[in-house]
Image (cartoon, helix red, strand yellow):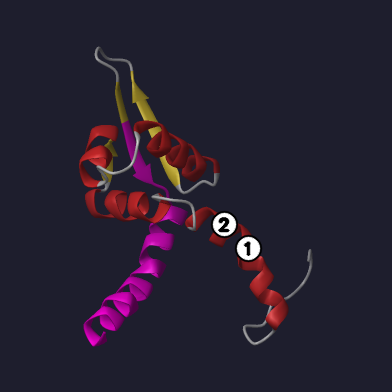
Amino acid sequence: MEGFDCAADDPRCYCLLDDVLDLLGRKYVMDIVCVVAVHGTVRFGTLEDHIPEASTSTLSARLDDLEAEGLVTREQYDEIPPRVEYELTDDGEELAERLRPVLEWVQERGRRA
């Protein structure tokens, strides 16, 4: 679809969402985005505290996914014990902001149920 100018009412445009929805649909991705958005900069242990049901390996894999997509940065400090911090990139912050109305919609639906 290179060079394709997407109009909001063109159904072909929805296929542009496939990659984003694939990423966001992975378990704990949106949880991680929300936690990092609230805290600004977080260490791995903070994520584990907020998402206790997620295994360490799954959290690591999701952070790698988010970093590969340019939504999260990972900063490792040369300390003992090692310190690693995660922060949303500008795109990650924009994603978190754009998810906010969806979260509000979900909460509103829950109140009506």
Measured as percent of width and height from the top left, residue 75 is found at 37, 30
Q: Residue at x 42, y 38 (%)?
A: 58
Secondary structure beneath disc 2? helix
User: For residue 84: magenta?
Assistant: no
Region rendered in magenta: 85-113
Residue at numbered disc 2: 22
Q: Position of residue 44 (x, y in %)?
A: 29, 34
Helix, strand or loop at disc 1?
helix
Q: Which mark is residue 18?
A: 1
How packed mark 2 is, by other alpha carbons closer than 10 Å (few <14, some 14-19, many 20 or more), is few
Q: Residue at x 46, y 49 (%)?
A: 71
Rendered view: 79 above or below 76: above
Examine the rendered structure and indicate whether residue 60 appears above or below residue 81.
Answer: below
Is 111 colored magenta in this rendering? yes
Within the image, what quadrant is residue 96 found in?
A: bottom left
Q: Nearer the viewer, residue 70 or 59?
A: 59
Alpha carbon distance from label 1 to label 2: 6 Å
Give the image location of residue 99, x and y in percent: 39, 67
Residue type marked 2: Asp
- Going by the image, does 108 lie left or right of 64? left
Image quarter where the N terminus lies is bottom right
Q: Residues within 10 Å of mark 1 (few under 14, many from 20)?
A: few
Question: Considering only vertical position in the picture, is 25 above or below 109?
Answer: above
Outermost residue toward the front in this view: 113
Q: Residue at x 43, y 40 (%)?
A: 63
Does the residue at mark 1 contact the one at mark 2 (Cβ under 8 Å)?
Answer: yes
